[in-house]
Image: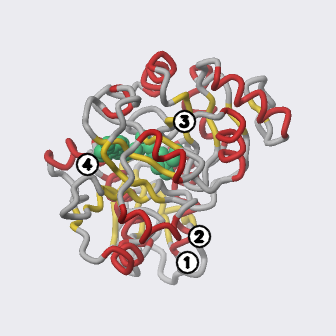
């Protein structure tokens, strides 16, 4: 068990009041969301935003997601788009939408672009802090730039240490993968910038055609969403991927094998870890970042990780694993 630290706040109402006050005063506070932990700051306060970039070591050209309580609050930072009505059932939830910005949004949030990414989170702790702080909150994932996102309060503590002054502990995140990002800033088309818990299939059901621009390794894409850099979400240990159900026959000594279900014929010389025991991609996604962090601390020569079937949440899961494996 980790030692309690003064920087942890609980989800009790007095602590959430304190978190909201800190945010209103221009401090950064790590908060749980239903996807991953975010490093929150007042989205309209450039000084607070500058701290977010400094704490994460994040390049200023990588824009931030603004979190708001509801569509009314969204209209204060972004131009409303009629297509939002079609996807209203996904909010509050793990969906981020890129829209035309309003002029009150600082350039630090948008990286100087004319668009802003907005999401209405579902996590009750994050929502309560939004209500109390009465301002939009910018929040990137609360990890050092390029490293695995945090899905537990202790992950934030482990990788940001004293640089992150306050962390609200809301337990483990439900989804464990970052929100789906779609771009609605052009009236002519919808683009998927990052696959996530709201699946491409579900979005196409509501919106019709969606252009997928998340293909790994394109520099153009890296400009559209710098978080989509090929190498991202990366542990220090090398990661090698294998197709769903197709175990590697030869593995390096002292390696770890990451599986999505119980299997026969495990190659010798490897230690086995289960993301799920019955092929549940939801469960595997929720455990992925926690397990990658744990294994990264164990000094394995390599992590062999099983990909999911490439559909539904499997697209987001494979996307994060593929980036973790990129060198
Ligand atoms: O689930 C999530 O979205 C989490 C939680 C904390 O809400 N946040 C998160 O933020 O993943 P971050 O900063 O780690 O990833 C945000 C991504 C980045 O890839 C960024 O480039 C992209 O969103 N982004 C932000 N604003 C954008 C914009 N105006 N246009 C295109 N991409 C944008
Ligand atoms: Mg991130």
Residue in the picture at 49% in, 35% down: 138
Q: Quadrant of ligand 1?
A: top left
Q: Secondary structure at mark 4?
A: loop
Q: Position of residue 311 (x, y in %)?
A: 37, 78
Q: Is residue 302 above or below residue 104?
A: below
Report, in whole angstroms, how far the alpha carbon at label 3 lies from the one at label 4.
27 Å
Q: In the rendered structure, which disc, 2 or 3, sits on the residue that comes first in sequence?
A: 3
Numbered tag placed on residue 283 in the rendering: 2
- Structural crowding at the residue carrying mark 2, measured as other residues with C-alpha within 10 Å and reported as few (<14), some (14–19) or many (≥20): some
Is there CB contact under 8 Å for labels 2 and 3? Answer: no
Q: In the rendered structure, which disc, 3 or 1, sits on the residue that comes first in sequence?
A: 3
| Disc 1 target residue | 280
Report, in whole angstroms, how far the alpha carbon at label 1 lies from the one at label 2.
5 Å
| Disc 3 target residue | 137
Q: Position of residue 99 (x, y in %)?
A: 33, 49
Q: Secondary structure at mark 1?
A: loop
| Disc 4 target residue | 230
Q: Secondary structure at mark 2?
A: helix
Is there CB contact under 8 Å for labels 4 and 2? Answer: no
């Amino acid at each position: 068990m980790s030692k309690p630290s003064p920087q942890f706040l609980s989800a009790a109402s007095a602590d959430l009041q304190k978190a909201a006050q800190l945010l209103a005063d221009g401090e950064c506070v790590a908060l749980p969301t239903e996807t991953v932990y975010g490093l929150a700051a007042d989205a309209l306060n450039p000084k607070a935003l500058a701290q977010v970039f400094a704490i994460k070591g994040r390049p200023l050209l990588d824009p931030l997601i603004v979190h708001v309580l509801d569509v009314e609050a969204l209209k204060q930072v972004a131009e409303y788009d009629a297509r939002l009505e079609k996807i209203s059932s996904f909010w509050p939830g793990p969906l981020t939408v890129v829209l035309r910005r309003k002029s009150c949004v600082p350039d630090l949030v948008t990286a100087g672009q004319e668009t802003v990414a907005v999401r209405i989170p579902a996590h009750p702790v994050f929502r309560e802090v939004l209500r109390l702080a009465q301002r939009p909150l910018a929040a990137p994932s609360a990890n050092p730039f390029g490293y695995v996102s945090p899905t537990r309060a202790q992950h934030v503590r482990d990788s940001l240490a004293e640089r992150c002054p306050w962390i609200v502990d809301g337990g483990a995140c439900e989804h464990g993968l970052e929100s789906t990002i779609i771009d609605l800033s052009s009236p002519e088309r919808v683009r998927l910038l990052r696959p996530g818990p709201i699946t491409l299939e579900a979005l196409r059901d509501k919106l019709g055609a969606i252009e997928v621009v998340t293909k790994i390794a394109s520099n153009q894409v890296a400009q559209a969403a710098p978080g989509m850099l090929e190498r991202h979400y990366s542990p220090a240990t090398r990661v090698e991927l294998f197709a769903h159900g197709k175990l590697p026959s030869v593995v390096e000594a002292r390696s770890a094998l990451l599986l999505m279900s119980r299997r026969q014929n495990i190659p010798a010389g490897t230690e086995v870890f289960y993301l799920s025991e019955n092929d549940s991609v939801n469960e595997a996604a929720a455990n992925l970042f926690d397990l990658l962090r744990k294994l990264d601390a164990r000094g394995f020569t390599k992590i062999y990780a099983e990909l999911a079937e490439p559909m539904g949440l499997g697209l987001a899961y494979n996307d994060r694993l593929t980036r973790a494996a990129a060198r």
